[in-house]
């Protein structure tokens, strides 16, 4: 999606995927909200579908989200190409980027991706793959899924997503965390690895936990 989006909002896709912001939060970002030195984005407002600026969705939605170099580099390149004194993302005419324009560009990009797949399938003499229906919120799910896969705790995911409580986070993403039984097996296999009888995988070095050796 980042590759096929128009250059003037390409960095928005990278930012959404790398920060987990809601689309309204992204549209409400000002240049001053991006702390490039600290590698963070401050969320303090959102742009409503009416175009007006309002407070974040909930009190917990007001937050500072850490972002990596990929996001900061994309934003720096974006601002170098499209300098702005106020709003981080603007339309080609210079007005703040709004929902209607974003949705139009997103849908056009989806069509471009499907057309590219169809063209590739025709050149390779194979059946074209029907790409999944993607919505902007999928980028938020992508961000959360990546964090969980990387070992982030429920609390950390809740904080960076701006959920009102960990209950909401678990309701949406509980299936992505390893089950407690799987976690128990993995932890104890790691701790007791040196006691393997040789029937299973090759013995590993004895590991110590809490200063004790089995």
Image (cartoon, rainbow, N blue to C red):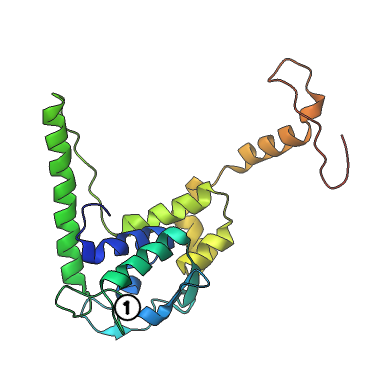
Q: Which of 170 and 2 is in front in this view?
A: 2
Q: Is residue 171 left or right of residue 101?
A: right
Could you tell me residue 139's position as x and y percent?
A: 35, 56
Point 47% across, 56% down: residue: 171
* Quadrant hosting residue 187: top right
- Relative horizontal placement of residue 203, taking residue 13 as reference (left or right): right
- Asked whether residue 60 appears in the rendered view, the answer is yes
The residue nearer to you, when weighing 174 against 19, is: 19
Where does the image place residue 70, in percent across and percent down from the top left? 42, 58
Q: What element carries label 1?
A: loop
| Location of residue 131 by image quarter | top left
Q: In this view, does 149 lie above or below 194?
A: below
Q: Callout 1 environment at 10 Å: few (<14), some (14 to 19), or many (20+)?
A: many
Name which residue lies at 39% across and 52% down.
Answer: 142
Kindly indicate the quadrant of the structure image that contains residue 78.
Answer: bottom left
In screen coordinates, is 196 left or right of 44?
A: right
Location of the C terminus by quadrant is top right
Left or right: 214 in relation to 80: right
Q: Which residue is drawn at 16% across and 26% down?
A: 124
Q: State the image coordinates of residue 75 (x, y, percent, origin top left).
A: 36, 67
Between 50 and 84, the one lying in front of the other is 84
Q: Percent x, y for residue 183?
A: 64, 41
- Residue beneath disc 1: 28
In the rendered view, tell whether residue 4 sits above or below residue 103: above
In the image, residue 193 above or below residue 42:
above
- In this view, the residue farthest toward the front is 80
């Amino acid at each position: 999606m980042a590759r096929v989006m128009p250059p003037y909002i390409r960095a928005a896709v990278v930012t959404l995927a790398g920060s987990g912001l809601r689309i309204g939060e992204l549209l409400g970002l000002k240049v001053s909200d991006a702390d490039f030195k600290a590698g963070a984005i401050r969320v303090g407002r959102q742009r409503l579908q009416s175009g007006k600026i309002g407070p974040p969705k909930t009190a917990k939605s007001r937050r500072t989200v850490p972002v990596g170099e990929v996001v900061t580099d994309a934003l720096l390149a974006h601002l170098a190409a499209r300098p702005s004194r106020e709003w981080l993302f603007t339309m080609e005419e210079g007005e703040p980027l709004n929902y209607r324009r974003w949705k139009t560009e997103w849908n056009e990009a989806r069509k471009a991706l499907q057309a590219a797949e169809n063209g590739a399938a025709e050149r390779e003499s194979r059946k074209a793959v029907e790409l999944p229906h993607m919505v902007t919120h999928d980028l938020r799910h992508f961000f959360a899924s990546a964090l969980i896969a990387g070992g982030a705790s429920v609390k950390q995911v809740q904080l960076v997503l701006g959920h009102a409580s960990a209950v909401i986070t678990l309701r949406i993403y509980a299936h992505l965390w390893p089950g407690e039984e799987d976690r128990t097996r993995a932890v104890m296999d790691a701790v007791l690895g040196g006691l393997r009888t040789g029937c299973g995988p090759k013995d590993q070095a004895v590991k110590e936990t809490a200063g004790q050796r089995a």
